[in-house]
Image (cartoon, rainbow, N blue to C red):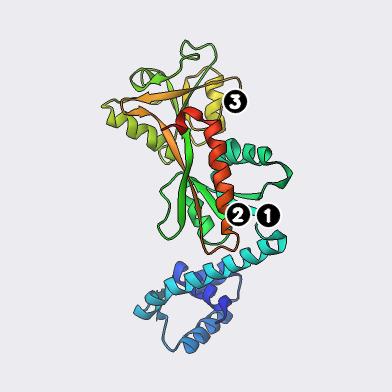
Amino acid sequence: MDLRLLRYFIAVSEHGTVHGAAEAVRVAQPSLSRQIRRLEQDLGFALFDREPRGVTLTAAGRAFLPVAKDLLTRSARATSTARSIALGAGDALTVASANTTVTDILAPFVVAQGADGPISNAVEALPEHVYSVFARGDADFAVGTRIPPAEFRSRVIGHAYLWAQVHPEHPLADSPGIRLTRLVEEPLIVMSRAHGVRQMFDNAVSRAGLSYTPATETESSSLALALAAAGRGICVLSDDSRYGLRTVPITAPDGDLVITLYGVWDDKHFAHARIEQCLEELSDFVAELYPQASRR
């Protein structure tokens, strides 16, 4: 089956019009219409009901859509696998992960592994999209903080703190931990509500029967650190410290606030044994990096 036709079919289904899909895939509208007709002839059923204002999927089209997406995903993963094999059968692995995880954990791990380490590339994504990047074949494995999808193999590779990032001259800077009841009394610099670390913090505050009003909300973790370093409050992040800030664990009534790190891979991957070995070594590295959190 021509994968190009499947891409056209998916584009039309997503845009709802042949015109919109034609612009997205950069194909002339008459040509795209002919290609969709050709695919329908090959399949033996209509994919769309044509209407004056656009098109809608038929029942058969709705049933075939996930099949088309799966075929394209498998094709992308095959291409990725072939590229990895050409680079050296498991010696040049690509990992999908969030920017913070790459910066604070994976990049230092690559340095510690030295010249013979297997990771050669990282695809950064928002935490909620990390596994999707891996699933569509853009990476050989993933390291994420969300619950892994059931269709893949996974393991816990460690835990990292949700930190209170404190100015070095603040009275709490040298504390071994900050109780949540004390922290909510401070001017807090937090991420926007869409971010996982904000949701985790808000959930902990709610479970403790507390409340707070942020001093500042931001979309940028780098700016949050800069604002804390400028003395505008304490920022709540999982990032490692910068600008001389002190990182202090946050203690809730049910324990320190820590983030679980998951390694996710496909046991059908040609280099699955090397990936599992890499995750085992990464787990040991995380245990050394965050010894208190890893004892949980």
The C terminus - image quarter: top left
For discs 3 and 1, the disc positioned in front in the rendered view: 1
Query: Does 52 sit above or below residue 218?
Result: below
- Depth check, front residue: 133 or 219: 133
The N terminus - image quarter: bottom right
Reading the image, the residue beneath label 3 is 242
Q: Residue 274's mark? A: 2
Reading the image, the residue beneath label 1 is 91
Instruction: Give the residue displayed 64% in from the left and 54% down from the top.
Output: 93
- Depth check, front residue: 165 or 222: 165
Q: CA distance from mark 3 to mark 1?
A: 32 Å
Q: Earlier in the sequence, mark 3 or mark 1?
A: 1
User: Amino acid type of disc 3?
Assistant: Arg
Q: Earlier in the sequence, mark 2 or mark 1?
A: 1
Q: Tell me if label 2 and label 1 are in contact, CB under 8 Å.
A: yes
Question: On the rendered structure, is 292 left or right of 270?
Answer: left
Q: Earlier in the sequence, mark 2 or mark 3?
A: 3
Q: CA distance from mark 2 to mark 1?
A: 8 Å
